[in-house]
Image (cartoon, grey):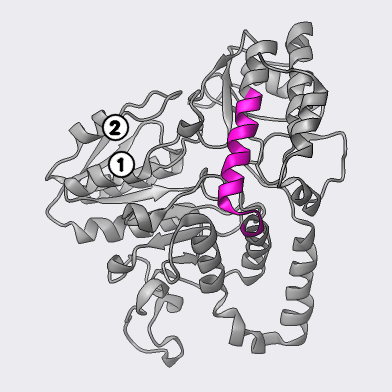
């Protein structure tokens, strides 16, 4: 029997080992309930001063002399992300470019390493930018893009994946946690299936990094990308990261920039890629933005990925339990098994768009995803159980009063 009292939520908060870390984030509006941490993480209080210090002291006072330590920043923060959140030993993760650009770089490198194979495999519920990049590469190279159908609530069936890969497969690219439903793939099992076919696997970790243990090294994963503005709290548009397994770092990525050059300041006439993970850099790193990423990741490192995962499972489980009692007309569109989901939950209803608008008007920030999903992302490091209770309580009032009906339907899209 679910205890739906607010006192129970408060008791859960009192027992939360991560409770003190909530105070590390900016909260200007105490009445605002933020349930969209899987789209944009909250601002750590230390970030503004860290950015100010980089601008004032490192840029303003030291000027170009700061490059003596700035050049190491993408490597240092990459190692921090890899070692604390991704199960990746040092020298395999670097902060660079956007997720889309990184996906392109690694996908091209993988395809070049599997010449003679003509199939790329992904699924129809993969994040749009991933599908678009792969579609473009297939079109440019005359390859087949094999798109598997996925249950958008439960995730990809591994049997279908096993049937889809074979000696013609060059690359399989999938999301570890589905952006719509939060369905979690078994990273090790998928990697094994792909490797049995002799192909390489490229993971999108955008919705798992910082909330779910990833264990890249232990699984034998080949390549991965991920953003830093969701659970890593790096800020809007913050640079992404990429992972290349040590044994694959002789791959040559397609964008040859001067920061990926072996002897950068020799200004030589030809490109000679740097050894190791550095060859996957391109242009000048955004130092101020990476500093913001480092502040967010330090908080996650303090929390520990094990505790973050436990809290995420508890938060989403609690949310699902409350929704089952209070919101029977909203169907669960996320795996019920906590081991099979990440740290966000989707609820299905034909009026999900208008419900989301009504929640925003009532100072609760959710998200909406097509075709009819209300997506709720309580971030383990910054969301309390009481916030989940308050957010669901306001939503049940909106639904009971049909308050969403005063909002317009989802805006028409240009087709």
- Side of 314 where 408 appears, left or right: right
Residue 310 highlighted magenta (yes or no) = yes
User: What x and y, as percent, mark residue 351?
Assistant: 63, 13
Separation of marks 1 and 2 at Cα, in angstroms? 8 Å
Magenta stretch: helix, strand or loop mostly: helix
Instruction: Name the residue located 30 percent from the left edge and 42 percent from the top edge.
Output: 190
| 96 vs 43, nearest the viewer | 43
Per the rendered image, the range of residues in magenta is 301-319
* Residue at the limit of the structure toward the bottom, as seen here: 266
Residue 54 highlighted magenta (yes or no) = no
Instruction: Name the residue located 52 percent from the left edge and 27 percent from the top edge.
Output: 414
Q: Please say if the residues under marks 1 and 2 sit with CB atoms less than 8 Å apart.
A: yes
Instruction: Name the residue located 18 percent from the left edge and 56 percent from the top edge.
Output: 114
User: What x and y, as percent, mark residue 305?
Assistant: 56, 51
Report the mark closest to the observer, 1 or 2: 1
User: What x and y, as percent, mark residue 101?
Assistant: 44, 57
User: What x and y, as percent, mark residue 90?
Assistant: 45, 70
- Side of 16 where 268 appears, left or right: left
Instruction: Name the residue located 72 percent from the left edge and 87 percent from the top edge.
Output: 62
| 172 vs 219, nearest the viewer | 219
The kind of secondary structure element at disc 1 is helix
Residue receiving disc 1: 189
Quadrant in the picture for the N terminus: top right
Question: Mark 1: few, some, or many residues within 10 Å (few <14, many ≥20)?
Answer: few
The kind of secondary structure element at disc 2 is helix
Residue receiving disc 2: 158
Mark 1 or 2 closer to N-term?
Answer: 2
Residue 127, label in figure: none
- Side of 153 where 147 appears, left or right: left
């Amino acid at each position: 029997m679910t205890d739906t009292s607010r006192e129970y939520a408060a008791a859960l908060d009192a027992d939360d080992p991560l409770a003190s870390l909530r105070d590390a984030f900016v909260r200007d509006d105490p009445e605002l309930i933020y349930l969209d941490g899987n789209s944009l993480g909250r601002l750590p209080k230390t970030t503004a001063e860290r950015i100010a210090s980089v601008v004032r002291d490192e840029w303003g006072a030291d000027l170009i002399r700061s490059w003596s330590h700035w050049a190491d920043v993408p490597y240092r923060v990459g190692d921090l992300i890899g070692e604390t959140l991704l199960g990746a030993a040092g020298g395999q993760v670097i902060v660079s470019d956007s997720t889309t650009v990184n996906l392109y770089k690694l996908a091209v490198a993988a395809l070049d390493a599997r010449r003679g194979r003509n199939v790329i495999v992904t699924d129809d519920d993969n994040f749009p930018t991933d599908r678009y990049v792969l579609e473009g590469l297939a079109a440019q190279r005359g390859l087949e893009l094999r798109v598997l159908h996925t249950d958008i609530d439960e995730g990809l069936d591994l049997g279908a994946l096993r049937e889809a890969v074979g000696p013609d497969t060059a690359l399989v690219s999938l999301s570890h946690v589905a952006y719509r439903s939060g369905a979690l793939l078994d990273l090790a099992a998928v990697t094994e299936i792909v490797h049995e076919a002799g192909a390489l696997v490229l993971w999108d970790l955008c919705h798992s990094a910082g909330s779910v243990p990833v264990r890249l090294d232990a699984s034998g994963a080949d390549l991965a990308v991920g953003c830093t503005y969701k659970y890593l709290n790096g800020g809007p548009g913050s640079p992404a990261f990429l992972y290349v397994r040590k044994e694959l770092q002789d791959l040559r990525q397609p964008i040859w920039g001067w920061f990926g050059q072996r002897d950068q300041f020799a200004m030589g006439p030809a490109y000679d890629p740097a050894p190791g993970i550095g060859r996957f850099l391109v242009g000048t790193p955004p130092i101020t933005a990476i500093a913001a990423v480092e502040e967010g990741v330090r908080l996650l490192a303090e929390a520990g990925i094990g505790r973050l995962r436990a809290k995420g499972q508890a938060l989403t489980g609690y949310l699902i339990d409350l929704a089952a009692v209070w919101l029977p007309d909203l169907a669960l569109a996320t795996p019920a098994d906590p081991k099979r989901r990440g740290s966000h939950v989707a609820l299905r209803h034909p009026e999900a768009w208008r419900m989301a608008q009504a929640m925003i008007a009532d100072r609760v920030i959710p998200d909406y995803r097509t075709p009819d999903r209300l997506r709720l992302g309580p971030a383990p490091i910054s969301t309390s159980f009481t916030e989940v209770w308050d957010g669901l309580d306001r939503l049940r009032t909106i639904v009971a009063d049909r308050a969403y009906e005063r909002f317009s339907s989802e805006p028409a899209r240009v087709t």
